[in-house]
Image (cartoon, rainbow, N blue to C red):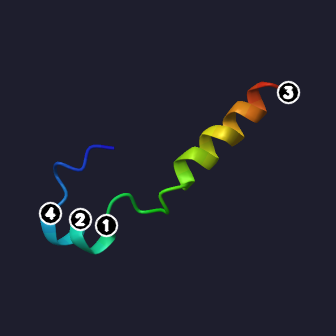
Amino acid sequence: YDWSAVPDLLRQHIGFPPFPADHLGNSLAHLAELVSL
């Protein structure tokens, strides 16, 4: 996503990434599992 237009105050409030650090790895593993079915 392009966060360049989001004001600093809002970015600080939401935080980045807006999910736990292990979420990306879990998501990729799940996608890999789905495409191998």
Mark-to-mark CA distance, 3 and 4:
42 Å
Mark 3 / mark 4, whichever is N-terminal: 4
Q: Which residue is mark 4?
A: 7
Give the residue at x 61% y 39%.
Answer: 28
Mark 3 / mark 2, whichever is N-terminal: 2
Answer with left or right where residue 16 lies relative to residue 36: left
Q: Which residue is mark 1?
A: 15
Q: Nearer the viewer, mark 4 or mark 2?
A: 2
Answer with left or right where residue 36 lies relative to residue 3: right
Mark 1 / mark 3, whichever is N-terminal: 1
Give the residue at x 14% y 65%.
Answer: 8
Mark-to-mark CA distance, 4 and 2:
6 Å
Mark 4 / mark 1, whichever is N-terminal: 4
Mark-to-mark CA distance, 1 and 2:
6 Å
Give the residue at x 32% y 69%.
Answer: 14
Q: Which residue is mark 3?
A: 37
Q: Nearer the viewer, mark 4 or mark 1?
A: 1
Within the image, what quadrant is residue 22 found in? bottom right
Q: Amino acid at mark 2?
A: Arg
In percent of width and height, residue 20 lies at 49, 63
- Per the image, label 1 sits on a secondary structure element best described as loop
